[in-house]
Image: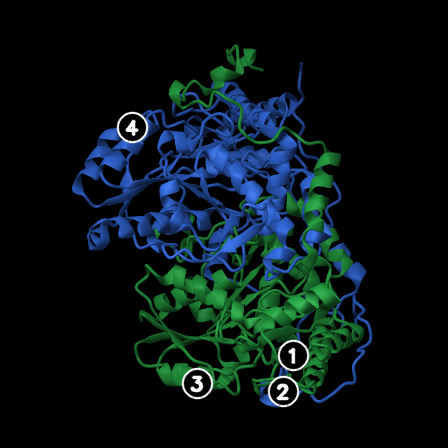
Amino acid sequence: MTTAITKVTSHISPNEQLIFERSQTGRIGYRLPALDVEEADLRIPAQFRRDDDLEGMPEVSEVDVIRHFVRMSTWNYSIDIGMYPLGSCTMKYNSRLNERVARIPGFANLHPLTEEHDAQGALEVIYELQQHLAEITGLPGVSLQPAAGAHGEMTGIMIIRAFLDSRDGAAASHRRTMLIPDSAHGTNPASAHLSGFSVKTIRSTAEGLTDLDHLRELCSHGDVAGLMLTNPNTLGLFETNIKQICEIVHEAGGLVYMDGANMNALVGVARPGDMGVDVIHLNLHKTFSTPHGGGGPGCGPCCCTKELEPFLPVPRLVKSGDATFRLDYDQPRSIGRVKAFFGNYGMMLRALSYTLTHGNDGLREATEAAVLNARYVAAGLVDDYDKPFAGSPMHEVVFTDKRQARKGVHTLDIAKRLIDYGFHPPTIYFPLIVQGAMLIEPTESVGRQELDQFIAAMKSIASEAVENPELVLNAPHDTRIGRLDEAAAARKPVLRWKPKD
Amino acid sequence: MLQAIGLESAEELFDSIPQDLLLKRPLNTPAALSEIELLNRFEQMGTRNTGARRTSFMGGGAYSHYIPTIVDHILSRSEFFTAYTPYQPEISQGTLQTIFEFQTLVCQLTGMEVANASMYDGSTALAEAVLMAERVTKRSKVVASSAVHPQYLEVVRTYVQHAGIHLELTPFHEQTGQSRKALAEAVDDQTAALVVQSPNFFGCIEDLAALADAAHAKGALLIVAITEAMSLGLLKSPGACGADIVVAEGQSFGVPLSFGGPYLGLFATREKYARQIPGRLVGEAFDKKGRRGFVLTLATREQHIRREKATSNICTNEGLIALAATVYLETMGRRGIQEVAHQCAQKALYARTTIARIKGFSIPLTGPTFNEFVVRGPIKAVELLSRLGKENQIDGGLALSRFMPDRTNDFLVCVTEVNSREQIDALIRALMNI
């Protein structure tokens, strides 16, 4: 099969002002029923009432709003346009069926403070999804309350802290070190800090795996509370020594937290609970296909061992003998509540719809396809780009700009040039330990033809970098706007619109 | 494809996983459902949520407001909902310009100078505000009114438990339901911030200007939390009252109840604290040809650069919900927001004054209210509300005993523009029959 590289061509891309610049006094885009009670004095003292008449807020018609957003929407890349190979972000297709499920009135119109007996269907959804996630991770204690990955991390680390405090009493105050590999996501150390831990960094080996000797050394001082590990790690490599790693940390009196950002490589194939992991967070907006929404909402469930279950956030959901569900707030060892109500419930509906439509075999197939696609890209690009680690990648693969850099073409330039070819760039300059990293995660949502086009585009850029580096350095050429001066934007930040004097 | 990469079977893809860690059985989850079967299952579960079908006067941090039809249409454009965080500005201007407009709208409503791109919800935004106040003032005592939403206080407690912050609660006034006196008296020169909610959990409007003066006199910040953001259409903005950090739950702006989420945390502050803000910020930028665009900016505050020294661990926020609020606020606009707020207040006042005249019922708190108020009934509120539900198909509000066991007969009633006079009168008739 031959595949032509398709470059982006210009299309309708209308200009559009800020809504505030479109606003015209007296325009409206809504109608409310007439007030049906007698208007009375509100008994709100004047000093408590607004006196600015909301000056500056937009005054526009409905069609103004529609055109405004539809025009702006054409400036976005999205999964529905094409492959979105952001490493560690798992940008997979978002099924429309899941969207429909989330909008069923029995769920969408349900108030979160509804009494339990009037919300049994909603509680059943939570219960069932918890069971699926427990089975997938091999970790039986589940809370769906955290709103995103970093929130789930914070929850997991606070659970570790509460467990240690409960186990060791006052002696736990000497156990305040969290070990984090140098390849970890930035949220890991930030979450550890929020939970009152200081961070020590573990080196990676030349093969891209956790350095066991360094781990042993760091574990030898009696101050280790735990380890935060992503597996497969952010280089796309499975930590082959994971059992040993967990044993070392456990022997040193610590617990193992796994960052589940890369669970798309493992669902239905291997389970963190079987590896010795104590607590993990999942990203429903990655692995379980809830839409990323241009930056959220997410949902970051926390799954843990039986031993850690009493420390999960309240309320806990309990299924009674007669198959009714109730909320249990009486959990004295819980870390407390991490969010009002029950978390990002709409994401739970979508994720349950995902697991139910895939079925157990479909979940495993998706994992196989995701890994196969990453392997295929790895094999396709290895002749043109530097692949710093020899190990077989799982669901994502890291390359660098080492060869292109000799001609002055760097990762950022390659990423921007890829836009001209109609692709969203991979994750760039992450993980931090790989100079000029390009972390590519195709996910299962692309077929061979599109993978071939992506590989062809990357190869073409590699030759452009040799033959015509300027072309790459000045990319993108076919977008409505060029590279923006981010340094100037940060020096004198303009963070809101203001009326011109 | 396997052959193309030199493999013979799918199993070989997982060669780097030790044999004893491989799951050698199918997952114990159900087999795949078709679209028809799936929709039937969820529809059935949905019908078991009897609470979703009733006339409702439930508020307490989540509110039923009218959502213009176009909001969901815009959200459903896949260019928005299937996009990632806008890390590549050249192909993310739709998302970025929307966030810039969102930040502006939040500033206009709250009367503040800078707003971020959103937090998870109102409760976590409040927790982050408390942490920020500690960073700004380098003081560790925080005093909060006990008239702040109880779940918000629980979340704050969780967030600060390892941050070396001492959280002190002050009582609200039993007659007025307001917090000013005790809160203003508790501030000292060790205090990082006063935390107040307005309208507070009982619906009462707080004297923010007096609290700002009290806080500032001791070098502390005033943090204002708002759970009913629609009140901003009528009430003086916290910024105009002197607040230093304003956080709010933005669910009222075009976001369905959806059993508590996803909702939207609003976070705004003064320009001088911009570099202490948690979360993402979008700013104006220009390309080489001088064309205006927008980028994520001041990223050196954030976790992917500063790691453990970041202002917060937040990464993914509530992007699409911020879009919903932006579409809502732009559609309703300057006039619509004020009209909705006015209708909420008028209808709530009608309900409040009429209920006060029913024999056996009273309004125990005298402070001014917006669209929520506490009613004291003749019997236990839990029992009363349960009867309203069963006999009248009305969700009459929130029994306060669920949060404060000693307030047995009190319940919180919320009235919005979606409640017709007919519904309010039905509630009143039902209460008269208790």
What's the amino acid at mark 2? Answer: Ile
Q: Position of residue B78 (x, y in %)?
A: 69, 44
What residue is disc 4 on?
Answer: A244
Determine the chain carrying the residue at label 4.
Answer: A
Q: Tell me whether circle 1 and circle 2 mark residues in contact (CB < 8 Å).
A: yes
Alpha carbon separation for disc pair 4 and 1: 62 Å
What residue is disc 1 on?
Answer: B234
Residue A199, numbered circle: none
Quadrant in the picture for the N terminus of chain B: top right
Element under disc 3:
helix
What's the amino acid at mark 4? Answer: Gln
Quadrant in the picture for the C terminus of chain B: bottom right
Alpha carbon separation for disc pair 2 and 4: 66 Å
For marks 3 and 1 on the same chain, the one whose residue lies earlier in the sequence: 3
Is the same chain shared between marks 4 and 1?
no
> Residue B18, can we see it?
no
Q: Going 53% across and 16% down the picture, which residue do you hit?
A: B10
Alpha carbon separation for disc pair 3 and 2: 21 Å
Q: Tell me whether circle 4 and circle 1 mark residues in contact (CB < 8 Å).
A: no
What residue is disc 3 on?
Answer: B213
Mark 3 or 2, closer to the camera:
2
What's the amino acid at mark 3? Answer: Asp
> Residue A434, can we see it?
yes
Label 2 neighbour load within 10 Å: few <14, some 14-19, many 20+: some
Describe the colour scheme in one phrase: by chain
